[in-house]
Image (spheres, coloured by chain):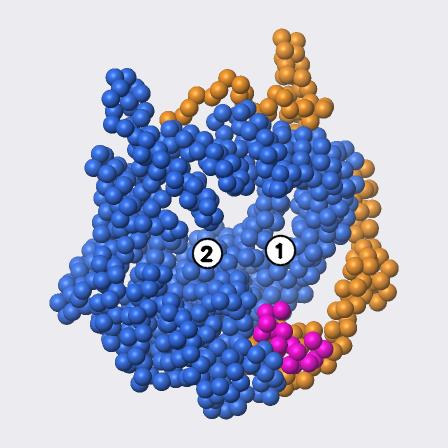
Amino acid sequence: MAEPQPPTITEGLDPAAPNTETESEPAPKGSTDSRRAAAALSSLDARTDDDSKNKPSPSAADRQALGDAMTRLEGLELGSKASALSSTTKSPEKERKEREAEDRRKVKVDAADVALVVEELELTKVKATELLKSYGGDAVRAITAYVNGVV
Amino acid sequence: MSQTLGQKEQSLFQQIAKHYENKQHKRGLKVADQLLKKVPDHGNTLAMKALILNAMGQKEEAFALGKTALRNDMKSHICWHVYGLLYKDERNFEESLKAYRFALKIKPDSSDIQRDLAHLQIQIRDFSGYIQSRRAMLKAQPTLRTNWTALAVAQHLAGDLEDAEKTLSMYEDILKVPPPKTDIEHQQALLYKNMIIAETENYERALEHLDIISKLVYDKQLVMELRADYLLKLNRFSEAEKIYRILINRNQENRSYFAGLVAALQLSESQPDKLTEMYAEIASKFPRADAPRRIPLDFLKGEEFRKAADDYLRRMLTKGVPSTFSNIKTLYQDNEKQAAVEKLVLGYAEGHTPNNTTDEKAAKEKESFHGSVLYFLAQHYNYYTSRDIPTALRYIDQLIEKEPKSVDYSMIKARILKNLGDTKGAAQMMDQARSFDERDRYINTKSAKYQLRNNDHTKALDTIGKFIKADATGGPLGETIEMQYVWFLTEDGEAYLREKKLGLALKRFNTIYNIFDLWQEDQFDFHSYALRKRQIRAYIYMIKWEDQLRSHPLFTRASIAACKAYILLHDQPQLAKDEPLVNGTSADSKAKKKAAQKAKKEQEKTESEADKKAKATKKDLDPEGKQLLETQEPLKDAMKFLTPILESSPKSLPVQEVGFEIFLRRKKYLLALRCLLATKSLAPASPHLHSQILRLQHALETLETPLDAKALKTFDTEFKPLLPAPAADLNTVNEDFLHKHNDIQSVLAAVHVRQVLDPDTNRTQAPQDLVKAIKQDSTSLQAAQITLDLLNRWHLDTSSYVTAAHERWPQATAFAAS
């Protein structure tokens, strides 16, 4: 059985709460206000209608902006490709990560070690190589770390 | 296109595609055959036919045809696309990806192929590939906002927050006219951007951004929650406090708001006075709120606690809130609090005097209070930290006498019987509770579960069937699978495992496995849907949820049970052949057979009534899991279950334990060591460790082929230090351990080791050791049952053990005199 709501409780936002909606319209009061509210509402609808018509064909200004954005996007793309060689647009964090990945790629791994890891730790060949590489190709260190759940 | 068609044929081909899109497979097939009569080696038509066959469930033919199609026309993007789709259906994502790539190379501007490729990439979390695809899609259709958002999502998931934010900003810059307030897509995109900024942990900027967008977002509560959180992280406490107070005014039961308020006031549990004051103030403002009254019980101590608990309990018990005990029981982690609560409630019970007032209303209130008190006490004495079963029974019987038809009381009584080990009585009692309210789904579910705990599959299915529509395909069982009743299937499988009916057990566990696979596959639908519906934040949460799907408790539980079933199948392969005879005489099994036959007949009857068409496509060819039992390598099959749980629930002790058992048997000693070390870090005092260390050492000492030198080095540094003494005799170590410990788990561990080292001695010694252990007060019923199971597995004499166990737990079904 639901208990009755105590009289102090009102539906919705607590009246004591400061209004975060600074630009919101006051609640319609009286006939003029309610007419204004109705007008606002209908203009709201009209705007959405316009909007949906607008979407497939943006205005000329939008088109211009869109073109600019696309060239910038492509520039970014090129930039990220170029950064593999000369990192100019990357943050230091990214740079460090990439350098580490680069170092790892250079590590030479013994095929017999890969086979051992694949057989005994049941990792895929790719993962086994990765594991060995991250321990500088040292199989004992790699296996020990894996067994301890470090990786 | 390499093979060209005449105009008439061309239109026929378009017809096929249309029929396929409309899922009119039979018609499509007809037209395809018509066309193939004229041009028998037309690759595209063959490919379309393959696609149709695949959709009709004829997977093998479809695949063969797809290959022929490709051979006939290697340069057709349609053939490659279809090939990719067929592989995707087989869940061979790698090959599928390759095929899509080929198709796209031939026809780079095909949006269909590009889209399928992109969805596959995100499905397998190929983030860099996904970013590339999304870039291409954006370039093809830059006016669609969804494409910009999707690129940001790709970058975000790949961990590149910076670029993701840039992409979103770029689109915002395009918008010369701000979108109307009612544009939900815009709102969601703004909130999404805020989420990305917050993930960079630059809360200053996140707050700034939130201030800008807050006016445009309808979800005011979310904005407040985010703002309060950011303010807190920026140490702007008084501002955060204000918002948390507003939030609490809106909802007094959300504990995270209280936690936020406490943090904003810079209070901690070392200042209980101030905290109490804060909660009391809120409680006085909201007379109906529970949280501000309940939370102080967590941090209060001693006399303060006693007073607060007294108030809380009196309030709840007077109201007659049925969940009072559930609200309180977490406090029992603290022995002192448990004792204090017990004393308080016993005091209420003693204070009760037979009614002698003339005021009828007061008398009624008093009576209801007393009932709540007894109900609380019955649960209290049944709870595992404060268990005293005879007392619990006394209280609950008193209540049932007064109100014999109460669902709540009978349910608690069933639970008490369960804790006595009386699974049969518990199931009966729970079903009685169910009969008092046949339309309550909760008690129906409970009853079915208790029936399964009593290994009564037929009754359980019957019970649950009362809430399943009568014409469901495949009867109630089919419906539980179709509707993914994972809990039911888990309990059903575990019951079969207890009965050693491994085929059916494995069948259920595999069904659960497939259900989780399906949940993963269901993502495919959302890669486009969620973006189209603009629910980006929800989509991100879903992706993250899917990434840890296999850590779901029921998946873990079912997988552990499946591993145990496979271990059993490996240790006792004859279980796959014989009719299992568990604790039963032949008369017993005859009765069982009869019941099974009857059940089968009934099932057939319901099946024949069921929709025959659906049955034809969905018929299970191996309903009893016989094929699963025919495996030659049960332990390899177990890996299907073990690998995902080791990956997603590495912190679960039972997972590591079952992993050790499987790897030891598979002679993968490094992996066994991995599980052992994980167990050690999770539970350094676990008696299992003793058994694991000694059994692993024994295996290493008796190797047929020596281990690789590099592997041995790892054992030298990681395993040798765990041994009690280098080069010690394992038997002596084990007997020493047995002398030092007398709890049943340690004794069982030692007996387990002895079973490996010296099974002859174990035959006479093990039952004696365990009978001694069972008499220890600390021995739990559950541990005693596990022990019996292992004794049976080693074919040791259990008679003296069962007698001792029966003496200790006379009601327990597992030890009932046979």
Q: Report if residue A141 lies within the magenta region.
A: yes
Q: Is residue B170 left or right of residue B344?
A: right
Query: Which residue of the protein is positioned furthest toward the left in this rendering?
Result: B587
Q: In the image, which residues are magenta?
A: A135-151
Establish whether labels 1 and 2 are both on one chain: yes
> What numbered label is drawn on residue B553?
2
Q: Which of the image's four quarters has the N terminus of chain B? A: bottom right
Q: Residue at x 34, y 43 (%)?
A: B379
Question: Residue A75: x percent and y percent?
Answer: 83, 55
> What numbered label is drawn on residue B115?
1
Q: CA distance from mark 1 to mark 2?
A: 34 Å
Q: Quadrant of residue A136?
A: bottom right
**SS of the residue at dot 2?**
helix
Compared to residue B357, the image places residue B312 above or below, namely below
Q: Nearer the viewer, mark 1 or mark 2?
A: 2
Sequence-wise, the earlier of marks 1 and 2 is 1
Which of the two residues, B548 or B469, is positioned nearer the viewer here? B548
Output the letter for the chain in blue: B
